[in-house]
């Protein structure tokens, strides 16, 4: 009853959520594709607010298995037979809506909302509220076709939607009217009237057909409702049983018999369900226990039967002394080993047999105990100035000595003595010094002698007789370890403190430290640290002090704190050659331009110079960096000649000596030009012709050079003919 009330509370809490789902889905839908009428408007609202007389329960089941998500998902349902609703209104009708699951507190609730009914390509809306169902969905996460749900809602709205779905559309009525018109107006005989019999013919009256009797709608479904899962231990599986149910016009007419289906699940062993092992102490054996189970298609575990031992796995029980302490029997002065029964169980875990505690071991005999004084320290009594000897009981097992009882007094005592120094007179403890009071307090230790061997029993303890602490510079006169304050231009001398030992020698209590004695610094500038980028320099100074007439160098050529920045002095601006050159292009190519950079010449404090480049300088022109070389000389026959004198005529060749001159840039190696010049010429006579074979006119009235005897062109000079170029092939 309590769980039922709890579910009713959850149902009420989800009512508002279901209403929101209803309106959200209704508002999100578009108009039905071929609906011809508006959905019935009722005042009933949902099943929670409408009159109870208008609430109807409708059986529905999904057309396919459907997982239940947390967000609404569109779903189609088959409709069962509805009480009070004609079967022809339901036949072939599909209910469409949405399904989901929600969680409220610790409850998981399934929800279904049916909004429309459909048949063929037509859809009708039931109402804006639709029809709803809610159920406890904690044990399942999906809907199955073999499981029927019951949705509730307005009967008036549902019947009206089904009736609208059954009414013919305007297209159906139009087709019916056209058919009736053809039947009432048969085709005439081309308008002729000669055939009286045909003219007087009348269509015979046809009697109305008897109402057609419709066949019942039979639906066969496979269901697992009411069927159990058969456990087959021999085959190691759980077989799901099902039955065939026959529905006629939505009503169950045959329930069928449960038989094995094709669905089965393998049986598995669950050892976690049976934490207690089966133990037989008589045979020193143990077995783990398990329970059979299977996992169904929803991922749910289903146990089968009770726990039983796993015959395939046997644990061997052994006696283990490591699980129990040793029992100490001081009356018999013996240590008795104990043991427990254990075995290696599941997960290789060492398990002790339940109900069997520790008892005397059968594997090891009792061990005698002995008194041991060396294992215990002395017990001092400082008030009585005595130390008491202690002892303990021990036993030896497997070569290891174990303590059986705490240390206790024996009947021996040893007197205390106070010791300050060893036999050599050296203090055995450091004195406690106070630099505030400039005193040193000695310390001592207590000692006892056991069997002729002295041993200390206390740490150092301060005495009550302080000594004065004195200062001295002895041992602290090395200036290398002093503090040198370069900012203040002084160095501090050092001293250390001591007290006198018994023999009068000093016992130093501090290392060397600064004293009140100071030494002034002597400073000499020995150089400069130049910063060319900033155009200033720091002076480098050497600092010395004089200690007992001996100079000591404190700092050598360093930049002292607070040293002034000494600025450079600008003297002039100059151009300097950069070592780079450029040249005029051919045909001249011999003029060179020396590139320069513009510098500022700065004078440093140490009288040296610093050149700072500030830009590009004016190039320096070198007019000619070329040389000319005679690279070839040769004699060429460039002319012929003839001479006429009186009746004698002579002819021959002119031989010209030619030099080939090459001009080259000496810095780049580029050849600027190649020219030829005539160095000299001479004539060679080839013959004389007195027969008039040579026309004297071709000799230009006397004699002369001719470039070509055939043309008789005159040869003025080489430069007139070739200029500075060379003959072909030379």
Image (spheres, helix red, strand yellow):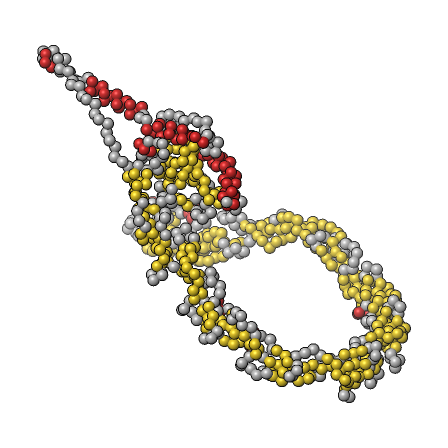
Q: Which quadrant of the structure image shows residue 37?
A: top left
Please determine whether, in this image, residue 66 is positioned above or below residue 354. Answer: above
Look at the image and tell me whether residue 126 can be seen: no
- Which is nearer the eye, 118 or 493? 118
**Residue 118 location (% of width, % of height):** 35, 33
Look at the image and tell me whether residue 52 can be seen: yes
Please determine whether, in this image, residue 525 is positioned above or below residue 401. Answer: above
**Residue 508 location (% of width, % of height):** 84, 74
Please determine whether, in this image, residue 18 is positioned above or below residue 704. Answer: above
Q: Which quadrant of the structure image shows residue 115?
A: top left
- Which is nearer the eye, 195 or 221? 221
Relative placement, left or right, of 709 versus 719 is left
The C terminus lies in quadrant: bottom left
- Which is nearer the eye, 280 or 295? 280
Residue at screen point 48% across, 37% down: 18
**Residue 616 location (% of width, % of height):** 63, 48
Residue at screen point 33% across, 31% down: 86
**Residue 116 location (% of width, % of height):** 39, 33
Q: Which quadrant of the structure image shows residue 239?
A: bottom left
Residue at screen point 41% across, 58% down: 304
Please determine whether, in this image, residue 206 is positioned above or below residue 142. Answer: above
Residue at screen point 71% across, 79% down: 407
- Which is nearer the eye, 503 or 385? 385
């Amino acid at each position: 009853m309590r769980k039922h009330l709890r579910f009713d509370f959850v149902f009420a809490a989800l009512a508002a959520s279901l209403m929101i789902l209803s309106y959200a889905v209704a508002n999100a839908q578009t108009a039905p594709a071929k609906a011809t009428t508006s959905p019935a408007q009722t005042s009933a609202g949902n099943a929670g607010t409408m009159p109870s007389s208008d609430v109807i329960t409708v059986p529905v089941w999904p057309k396919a298995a459907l997982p239940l998500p947390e967000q609404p998902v569109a779903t189609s349902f088959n409709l069962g037979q509805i009480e009070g609703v004609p079967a022809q209104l339901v036949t072939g009708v599909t209910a469409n809506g949405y399904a989901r699951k929600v969680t409220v507190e610790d409850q998981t609730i399934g929800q279904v909302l049916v909004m429309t009914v459909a048949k063929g390509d037509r859809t009708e809306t039931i109402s804006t509220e639709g029809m709803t169902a809610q159920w406890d969905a904690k044990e399942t996460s999906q809907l199955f076709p073999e499981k029927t749900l019951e949705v509730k809602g307005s009967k008036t709205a549902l019947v009206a939607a089904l009736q609208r779905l059954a009414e013919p559309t305007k297209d159906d009525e139009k087709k019916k009217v056209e058919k009736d018109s053809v039947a009432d107006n048969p085709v005439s005989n081309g308008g002729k009237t000669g055939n009286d019999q045909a003219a007087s013919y009348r269509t015979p009256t046809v009697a109305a057909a008897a109402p057609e009797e419709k066949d019942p709608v039979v639906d066969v479904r496979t269901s697992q409702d009411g069927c159990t899962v058969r456990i087959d231990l021999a085959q190691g599986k759980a077989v799901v049983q099902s039955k065939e149910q026959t529905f006629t016009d939505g009503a169950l007419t045959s329930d069928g018999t449960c038989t094995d289906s094709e669905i089965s699940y393998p049986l598995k062993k669950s050892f976690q369900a049976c934490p207690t092992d089966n133990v037989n102490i008589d045979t020193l054996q143990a077995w783990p226990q398990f329970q059979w189970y299977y996992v169904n298609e929803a991922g749910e575990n289903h146990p089968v039967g009770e726990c039983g031992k796993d015959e395939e796995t046997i644990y061997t029980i052994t006696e283990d002394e490591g699980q129990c302490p040793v029992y100490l029997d001081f009356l018999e002065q013996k240590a008795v080993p104990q043991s427990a029964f254990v075995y290696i169980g599941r997960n290789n875990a060492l398990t002790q047999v339940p109900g069997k505690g520790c008892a005397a071991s059968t594997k090891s005999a009792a061990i005698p105990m002995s008194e041991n004084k060396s294992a215990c320290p002395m017990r001092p009594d400082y008030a009585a100035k005595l130390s008491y000897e202690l002892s303990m009981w021990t036993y030896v097992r497997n070569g290891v000595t174990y303590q059986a009882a705490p240390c206790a007094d024996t009947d021996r005592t040893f007197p205390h003595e106070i010791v300050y120094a060893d036999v050599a007179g050296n203090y055995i403890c450091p004195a406690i010094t106070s630099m505030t009071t400039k005193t040193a307090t000695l310390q001592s230790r207590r000692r006892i002698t056991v069997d002729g061997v002295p041993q200390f029993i206390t740490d150092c303890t301060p005495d009550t007789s302080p000594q004065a602490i004195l200062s001295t510079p002895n041992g602290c006169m090395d200036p290398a370890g002093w503090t040198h304050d370069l900012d203040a231009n002084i160095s501090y001398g050092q001293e250390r403190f001591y007290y006198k030992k018994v023999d009068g020698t000093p016992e130093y209590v501090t290392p060397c430290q600064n004293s009140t004695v100071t030494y002034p610094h002597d400073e000499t500038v020995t150089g400069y640290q130049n910063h060319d980028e900033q155009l200033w320099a720091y002076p480098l100074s050497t600092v010395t002090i004089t200690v007992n007439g001996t100079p000591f160098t404190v700092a050598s050529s360093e930049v002292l704190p607070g040293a002034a920045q000494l600025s450079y002095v600008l003297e002039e601006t100059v151009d300097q050659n950069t070592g780079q050159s450029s040249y005029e292009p051919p045909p001249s190519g011999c003029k060179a331009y020396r590139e320069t950079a513009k510098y500022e010449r700065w004078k440093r404090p140490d009288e040296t110079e610093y050149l700072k480049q500030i830009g590009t300088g004016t190039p320096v022109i070198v007019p000619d960096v070329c040389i000319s070389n005679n690279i070839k000389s040769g004699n060429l026959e460039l002319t012929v000649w003839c001479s006429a004198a009186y009746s004698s005529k002579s002819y021959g060749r002119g031989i010209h000596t030619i030099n080939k001159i090459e001009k080259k840039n000496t810095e780049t190696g580029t050849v600027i030009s190649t020219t030829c010049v005539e160095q000299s010429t001479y004539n060679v006579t080839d013959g004389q012709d007195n027969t008039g074979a040579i026309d004297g006119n071709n000799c230009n009235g006397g004699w002369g050079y001719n470039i070509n005897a055939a043309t008789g062109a005159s040869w003025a000079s080489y430069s007139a003919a070739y200029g500075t170029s060379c003959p072909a092939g030379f």
